[in-house]
Amino acid sequence: MARRRKGRPIDGVILVDKPTGISSNDTLQKVKRIFFAQKAGHTGALDPLATGMLPICFGEATKFSQFLLDSDKRYRVIAKLGERTDTSDSDGEVVQTREVKVDRGQLERCIAKFRGTTDQIPSMYSALKYQGRKLYEYAREGIEVPRESRKITVYSVDLLRFSDNEVEMELHVSKGTYIRTIVDDLGEMLGCGAHVTFLRRTGVSNYPMERMMTIEQLEALLEQAKVQDIAPSELLDPLLLPTDTAVQDLPEVNIPPASAVYILNGNPVRAGRLPAEGTLVRITVAEQKEFIGIGVVDSEGQLAPKRVMANPQA
């Protein structure tokens, strides 16, 4: 007998303003309980120290969460010069203290070196895995394991403030970029060391900051529903962004309802105005542009389904 899943089947994306001091997974579990959702997943962990935008996908939207993992991110960070820690942030232990002899011109020249595409070696205090275990698990045991460098792109990095040995910056970066590592590398360039004391993610993909909700705001809506004697879904569900916002950056291919039947059953179809072979696309249907999934242009010039909705219109 199949086990019945707890919660209700809802679909969509909620933009949570993650608080400091708790993990992304703890945030996910709190929000999942508030919405009483059957299925939920987040789209890229933030350190416990960090705050800011954490898109949480419900139901069918979890099928497309990888696209948010792979999207660009924006951050505001404050770094303290003169101290290097073992985690590259203020949650770690200070391992080196050095005198700060840095002027603004030197700082700006060093910051400029991070712009563009470079190689970055991930921190040992990251969630990347080595032989099945997360790097931070090794780090906590005092074990250092080999990490491969990977390409990252810093589209922009702007100095907002430099005072009292503190550096405040805004960054727009590609997926997989560790801001703590950038700060640690900057401190070594400057010869004084540095670590993160404040980190806030201000953007994921093209999601608007003003749609973020704190856990306290969501809990307040739960209480409001109780006072008004209405279903919490009446106040919570309007906050959900449509499932297809997770793939909003993909080019759209609109097909007729007859073709949609084939796509939803896993079969390729002919379609007009297709992009180049191998291109991932967002598939919509008819004039209503109902989202039914994503596909790829195959070697025969057809639109082949890659991941489709179980219940379109979510």
Image (cartoon, helix red, strand yellow):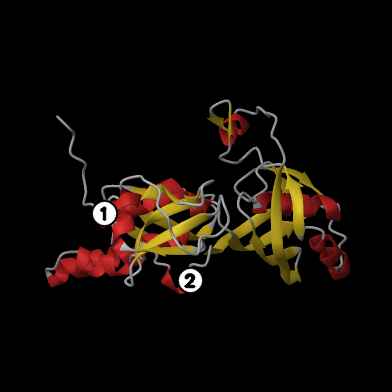
Label for residue 91? Answer: none
Left or right, 241 with respect to 154, comes to: left
Callout 1: helix, strand or loop? loop
Q: Position of residue 283 (x, y in %)?
A: 41, 59
Q: Which x, y percent locates residue 138?
A: 60, 29
The quarter of the displayed image where residue 105 is located: bottom right
Q: Which residue is mark 1?
A: 311
- Residue at point 51%, 47% (across, down): 300
Give the residue pinned by disc 2.
Answer: 208
Residue 142, given in percent of the width and then of the height, sits at 65, 29
Placement of the C terminus among the 4 image quadrants: bottom left
The amino acid type found where label 2 is placed reads Pro
- Count residues near mark 1 (Cα–Cα under 10 Å), then give few for <14, some for 14-19, many for 20+: few
Residue at point 43% right, 54% down?
294
The answer to whether 211 appears left or right of 249 in the picture is: left
Considering the image in quadrants, where does the N terminus appear?
Answer: top left
Residue at 42 percent across and 55 percent down: it is: 270
Q: How many marks?
A: 2
Amino acid, disc 1 = Asn
